[in-house]
Every structure is written in C-alpha cells, then in structure tokens.
Image (cartoon, rainbow, N blue to C red):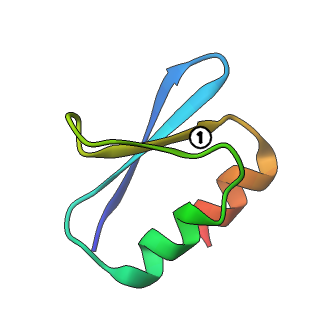
Amino acid sequence: MNLTLLKRNDREIAVKMSSFEQGHVNRVKSIPGRKWLPDQLLWTFPYSVSAMKSVSN
C-alpha cells in the first residue's frame, strides 16, 4: 500500500491511502487531532515531528 503525504497548509498534513489496510488506519487514528475527510478520502492531522514519525514508520 502507498501512503501519500500532502502539506495542506503551515499547520496541517494530510495522508491519502491508495488502499485500505487496517494497520495503517489504526496508526493514523492514534495521532492526536487527526480528522477523516470522507469527501476527499484522506486523513488530516496537525503538522508535528511526532505525527510525521507515526505515519512514516
């Protein structure tokens, strides 16, 4: 599965997943402040080093 990281603005990053994998969804759901945007099929979360590490590991 591919994860695409997108910078939405100076305070927010988005993750778009090419396919559903529960482990990746669980990882994103563990990030404080995350939001699911169903109309865009992506997750957003506050831009921080710890959030980026959570997604990239």
Q: Which image quarter holds the N terminus?
A: bottom left
Q: Secondary structure at mark 1?
A: strand
- The amino acid type found where label 1 is placed reads Phe
Give the percent coordinates (x, y) of residue 26.
51, 75
Q: Is residue 1 left or right of residue 32?
A: left
Q: Which image quarter holds the C terminus?
A: bottom right
Q: Is residue 25 left or right of residue 39?
A: right
Give the percent coordinates (x, y) of residue 15.
42, 48
Q: What residue is drawn where x is 24% and y is 45%?
A: 41
Give the percent coordinates (x, y) of residue 52.
66, 52
Q: What residue is drawn where x is 69% and y is 34%?
A: 47
Is 51 rendered above or below residue 27? Answer: above
The image shows a total of numbered marks equal to: 1
Mark 1 Cα-neighbour bin, 10 Å: few <14, some 14–19, many ≥20: many
Is 54 rendered above or below residue 48? Answer: below
Q: What residue is drawn where x is 71% and y is 60%?
A: 53
Residue at label 1?
A: 45
Q: Is residue 39 left or right of residue 34?
A: left
| Image quadrant assignment for residue 12 | top right
Q: Nearer the viewer, residue 13 or 34?
A: 34
Q: Is residue 28 left or right of residue 49?
A: left
Q: Nearer the viewer, residue 32 or 56?
A: 32
Q: Nearer the viewer, residue 10 or 22?
A: 22
